[in-house]
């Protein structure tokens, strides 16, 4: 046995860890009935592979080998404890009885990955815990990595994960894919987790931007996995939405880190390949005729992605899509976006009347984007004093540095004297 | 696995509820209780007298102190409970969502803790 072969095997195991450790974990959780035992068993299995594969060769089905080794290691652990505890001996027997590897191996494995996703995104867990648990268990990110991305102390995040696992165990949250009847509601929760993770990375304006951008990539990866396992229209729609937004990333900020709005972006910087993927997915989701808000937002993003310039955008159709979206999701933020699209289509005056009507209702009175939308329309109408007042209101409402610099730039252009 | 479903609702609203509405509500509770008994998931269940009848007791340095009223003033008050048998939290959530007060108040679902060796 040469050192070359040994190092090749080690590389193979490293690659396998990256590609398959989450699948192995997902199955071990089912076989062993708990997250902690499964994590221990998975690490034992990879350690055993490092010990034996260099001399005995890589098994024909490495993933199956890792799962069954992990299961034996877990039973061994219980046996060792069982010398002192009769309850553990019973648990070990029970595990041997129920945890024999099934014959339809690969189907079960795919189901296990879905079980893991739905368990980590269970509605009985807090929203924060769902995100932390999904990134840790489904994506395999390290606790420190997640904590850095969300700008919270690693200990806080670790506690959040421990608490969530404790609730899964003690309240008996089952390791199951929801039934057909429950699926729509439960899928919404999963999609919302993905959406929040994506946005956290996409709108990253503070902290370590590189780490935070990884979150968007992770959300897209997770979206692809979900679509592969459960090709529901809204899962497809959300994946399309994320791909289309993310495709604009290279054009969204200048070399100096300044924010560039959609109508001023250099569209040649957009990621065409990702746009093509996004467009195909939008078509697929729309064709199902069972789509919802994510698909509609993706369809809007698709129209932007296809336009050569802001002026050449099909604003009429965008307004139509916002109308449908409003019927599904009556939110003032959607209304505001619709008003902005109408302004592009029918002129700033019509848009401003709508924005003012929304602002008059008060719900968005403290939402900086509502005031900057008003400011922008006033600016285009030549109503400089009103534009300045609205930008100043927006400035007072946002703490995000790139947004603040953007507004200050606009104010300077309008000749306002900054205090 | 046993779960305790604690029923929280606004007591003050119950006092001012018209008779027909009260009767309808009692009817719904009767139907729910009968259904869950038949399913074999029922362990126990009771309605409580209003919080004005509550007494809160503490023993400090061997001395009993009693105060008039519930442990904590809350917007919704504990008005009753069901102790149920469910396979897992999903089933407990399904059952709890059918308790009539879930539509007007809130149901807190708590797994019953089992101590080792029990």
Image (spheres, coloured by chain):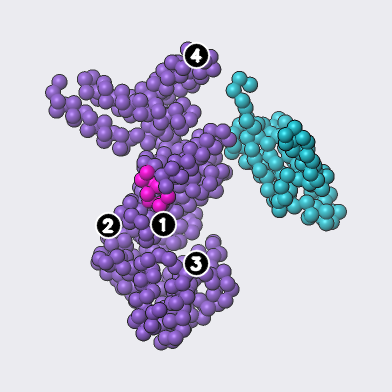
Chain colours: A purple, B cyan
Image check: B71 left or right of A28? right
2 and 3 marks in contact (CB < 8 Å): no
Q: Quadrant of residue A4?
A: top left
What residue would you read off at disc 2?
A273
Image check: A93 left or right of A70? right
Q: For the residue labelled by badge 2, is the local secondary structure a helix, a strand or a loop?
A: helix
* Disc 2 from disc 4: Cα separation: 60 Å
What residue would you read off at disc 3?
A334
Q: Which chain hosts label 2?
A: A
Q: Which chain hosts label 3?
A: A
- Residue A216 in percent (x, y) is at 36, 53
Q: Residues within 10 Å of mark 1 (few under 14, many from 20)?
A: some
* Disc 2 from disc 3: Cα separation: 28 Å
Q: Is residue A224 visible?
A: no
| Residue farthest front in this picture | B61
Residue drawn at x 53%, y 46% is A126
Q: Earlier in the sequence, mark 2 or mark 4?
A: 4
Residue drawn at x 30%, y 34% is A17
Q: Is residue A401 above or below residue A114?
A: below
* Disc 4 from disc 3: Cα separation: 62 Å
Q: Quadrant of residue A70?
A: top left
Image check: A57 left or right of A301? left
What residue would you read off at disc 1?
A199
Disc sitting over residue B34 in the figure: none
State the extent of the magenta-drawn residues as a range.
A144-152
Q: A147 and A197: which one is in front?
A: A147
Of labels 3 and 1, the one closer to you: 1
Disc sitting over residue A84 in the figure: 4
1 and 2 marks in contact (CB < 8 Å): no
Q: Earlier in the sequence, mark 3 or mark 1?
A: 1
Q: Which quarter of the rendering shows the N terminus of chain A?
A: top left
């Amino acid at each position: 046995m040469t050192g070359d072969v040994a190092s090749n095997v080690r590389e193979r195991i490293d690659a396998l860890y990256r590609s398959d450790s989450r699948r192995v974990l997902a199955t071990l959780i089912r076989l062993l009935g708990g997250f902690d035992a499964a994590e221990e068993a998975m690490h034992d299995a990879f350690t055993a592979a490092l010990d034996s594969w260099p001399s005995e060769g890589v098994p024909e089905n490495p993933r199956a080998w890792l799962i069954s080794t992990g299961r034996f290691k877990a039973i061994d652990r219980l046996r060792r404890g069982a010398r002192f505890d009769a309850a553990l001996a019973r648990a070990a027997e029970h595990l041997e009885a129920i945890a024999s590897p099934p014959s339809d191996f690969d189907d079960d494995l795919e189901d296990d990955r879905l079980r893991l996703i739905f368990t980590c995104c269970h509605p009985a867990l807090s929203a924060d815990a769902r995100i932390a648990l999904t990134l840790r268990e489904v994506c395999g990110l390290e606790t420190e990595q997640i904590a850095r991305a969300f700008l919270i102390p690693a200990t806080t995040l670790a506690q959040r994960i421990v608490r969530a696992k404790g609730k899964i165990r003690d309240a008996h949250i089952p390791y199951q894919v929801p039934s057909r009847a429950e699926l729509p509601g439960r899928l919404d929760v999963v999609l919302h987790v993905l959406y929040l993770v994506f946005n956290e990375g996409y709108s990253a304006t503070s902290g370590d931007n590189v780490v935070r951008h990884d979150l968007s990539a992770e959300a897209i990866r997770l979206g692809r996995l979900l679509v592969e396992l459960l090709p529901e229209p809204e899962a497809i729609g959300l994946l399309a939405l994320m791909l289309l937004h993310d495709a604009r990333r290279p054009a969204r900020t200048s070399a100096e880190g300044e924010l560039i709005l959609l109508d001023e972006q250099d569209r040649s910087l957009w990621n065409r390949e990702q746009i093509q993927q996004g467009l195909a997915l939008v078509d697929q989701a729309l064709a199902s005729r069972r789509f919802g808000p994510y698909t509609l937002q993706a369809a809007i993003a698709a129209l932007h992605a296809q336009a050569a310039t802001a002026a050449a955008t099909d604003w009429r159709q965008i307004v139509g899509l916002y109308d449908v979206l409003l019927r599904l999701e009556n939110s003032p933020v959607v209304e505001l976006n619709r008003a902005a699209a109408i302004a592009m289509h029918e002129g700033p005056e019509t848009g401003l009347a709508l924005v003012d009507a929304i602002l008059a209702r008060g719900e968005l009175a403290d939402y900086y984007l509502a005031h900057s939308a008003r400011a922008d329309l006033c600016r285009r109408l030549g109503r400089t004093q009103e534009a300045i007042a609205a930008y100043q209101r927006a400035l007072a409402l946002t703490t995000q540095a790139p947004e603040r610099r953007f507004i200050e730039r606009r104010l300077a252009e309008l000749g306002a004297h900054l205090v | 696995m046993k779960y305790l479903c604690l029923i929280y609702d606004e007591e003050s609203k119950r006092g001012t509820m018209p008779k027909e509405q009260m009767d309808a509500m009692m009817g719904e509770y009767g139907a729910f209780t009968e259904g869950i008994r038949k399913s074999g998931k029922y362990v126990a269940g009771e309605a409580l007298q209003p919080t004005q009848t509550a007494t809160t007791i503490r023993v400090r340095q061997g001395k009993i102190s009693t105060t008039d009223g519930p442990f904590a003033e809350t917007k919704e008050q504990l008005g009753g409970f069901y102790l149920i048998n469910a396979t897992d939290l999903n089933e407990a959530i399904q059952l709890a969502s059918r308790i009539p007060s879930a539509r007007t108040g809130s149901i807190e679902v708590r797994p019953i803790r089992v101590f080792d060796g029990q």
